[in-house]
Image (cartoon, rainbow, N blue to C red):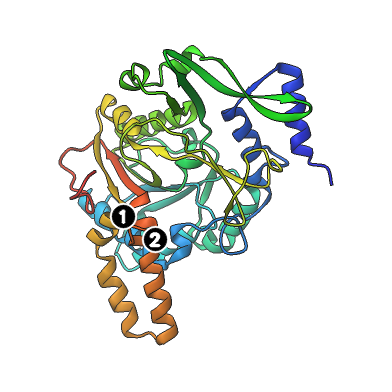
């Protein structure tokens, strides 16, 4: 069966010349008809990868408790926006709302918004979350103004398209994609001025050869979030895999059926991600006069919120099979050999006096 998306990408290259890795990612993941996220449910054992909310209910419960505590510290506003960016199957938000249902006033005050582009995942989210009357949006500009905002994004930033810049000696070039004998190949072209501005001075002037990954889309998204948080007295929580400090390195990865595959193998049928540069996010937030909490490890964040205690309580009424499942889920979430250290947590807010739990230890 012909790969229609592959033909579309090849025709784009034939028409306009080389394309960036960011262009390729955007088409592979988000093409309206054939994009990876537009056509399937990628999560779970039958999908291509698994996220923390699917590993254990305890992840969403901890996030729910964190949000409940934050809402009360903000003065329990009678109206606030609860937004999740990239809500997947709706599992995280379902666990958040189940955990907070006993907090007087929280559910009555919330206005639930979900930023999602996938028709397939929207349908699944509707099945789980319709009782909470969510509103789906395509971008942050669709949110109501002058309403306090609590934003959650778990494994959202890693899927935003990146550019790869390559340094050899004193020369920087951008890694782009061309056709050779009707097959995709990498080629190196001069760096666009917009991208040069994304490279920190310490990296640009480094004497070390290597790859630096920059994301114009991520930078634009964080800028929009920063503006919203300042205007609407909000807090944003990001959980993703990545590095706490800006560094060189090729982290682009393509995954199908829980295995790594070649970037060019059947476009539109694999997940494509890259590690998140948390220092870059922090630098932008500081420039926008926001307070940055973290990054800290997922292990530190979740244990700081009491996930160990929650696991013990759940085990008290569990049979042996359930206990083993709880232990396995907990270990996967916090073990340093699994998600515990690879995944980082960061929060942004404009209020220097607001105490955010889980951030006693920063990297």
Looking at the picture, tell me which residue is in the foreground, 226 or 293: 293
Q: Is residue 100 left or right of residue 116?
A: left
Looking at the picture, tell me which residue is in the foreground, 123 or 47: 47
The disc, 2 or 1, on the residue closer to the chain's N-terminal end is 1
> Could you tell me which quadrant the C terminus lies in?
top left
Q: Percent position (x, y) of residue 164?
A: 51, 27
Q: Is residue 271 left or right of residue 107?
A: right
| Residue lying at 40% horizontally and 71% vertically, measured from the top left | 328
Count up the numbered dots. Answer: 2
| Residue lying at 29% horizontally and 64% vertically, measured from the top left | 104
Q: Percent position (x, y) of residue 249?
A: 43, 33
Above or below 53: residue 264: above
Looking at the picture, tell me which residue is in the foreground, 106 or 33: 33
What distance separates the C-alpha of mark 2 from that of mark 1? 8 Å
Tags 2 and 1 touching, CB below 8 Å: yes
Q: Callout 2: helix, strand or loop?
A: helix
Q: Percent position (x, y) of residue 112?
A: 45, 51
| Residue lying at 51% horizontally and 15% vertically, measured from the top left | 191
Q: Callout 1: helix, strand or loop?
A: helix
Above or below 175: residue 311: below
Residue 67 numbered mark, or none:
1
Residue, disc 2? 96
| Residue lying at 55% horizontally and 39% vertically, measured from the top left | 138
């Amino acid at each position: 069966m012909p790969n229609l998306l592959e033909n579309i990408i090849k025709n784009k290259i034939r028409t306009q010349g080389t394309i960036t890795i960011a262009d390729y990612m955007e088409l592979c993941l988000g093409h309206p008809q054939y994009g990876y996220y537009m056509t399937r449910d990628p999560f779970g054992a039958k999908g291509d990868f698994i996220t923390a909310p699917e590993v254990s209910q305890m992840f969403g419960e901890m996030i729910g408790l964190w949000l409940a505590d934050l809402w009360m510290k903000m003065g329990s506003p009678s109206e606030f926006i609860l937004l999740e960016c990239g809500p997947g199957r709706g599992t995280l938000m379902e666990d958040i709302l189940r955990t907070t249902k006993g907090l007087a006033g929280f559910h009555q005050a919330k206005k639930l918004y979900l930023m999602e582009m996938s028709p397939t995942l929207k349908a699944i989210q509707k099945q789980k979350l319709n009782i909470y009357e969510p509103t789906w949006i395509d971008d942050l500009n669709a949110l109501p103004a002058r309403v306090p905002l609590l934003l959650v994004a778990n494994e959202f930033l890693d899927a935003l398209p990146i550019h790869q810049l390559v340094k050899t000696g004193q020369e920087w070039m951008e890694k782009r994609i061309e056709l050779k004998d009707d097959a995709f190949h990498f080629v190196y072209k001069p760096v666009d001025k917009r991208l040069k501005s994304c490279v920190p001075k310490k990296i640009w002037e480094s004497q070390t050869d290597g790859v630096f990954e920059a994301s114009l889309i991520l930078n634009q998204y964080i800028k929009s979030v920063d503006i919203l948080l300042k205007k609407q007295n909000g807090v944003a929580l990001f959980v993703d895999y990545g590095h706490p400090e800006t560094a060189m390195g090729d982290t682009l990865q393509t995954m199908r059926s829980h295995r790594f595959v070649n970037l060019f193998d059947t476009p539109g049928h694999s997940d494509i991600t890259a590690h998140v540069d948390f220092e870059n996010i922090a630098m932008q937030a500081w420039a926008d006069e926001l307070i940055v909490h973290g990054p800290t490890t997922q292990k530190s964040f979740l244990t700081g919120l009491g996930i160990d205690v929650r696991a013990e309580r759940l085990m008290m009424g569990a049979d042996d099979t359930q206990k083993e499942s709880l232990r396995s889920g907990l270990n996967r979430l916090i073990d340093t050999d699994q998600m515990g250290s690879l995944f980082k947590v960061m929060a942004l807010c404009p209020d220097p006096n607001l105490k955010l739990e889980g951030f006693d230890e920063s990297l």
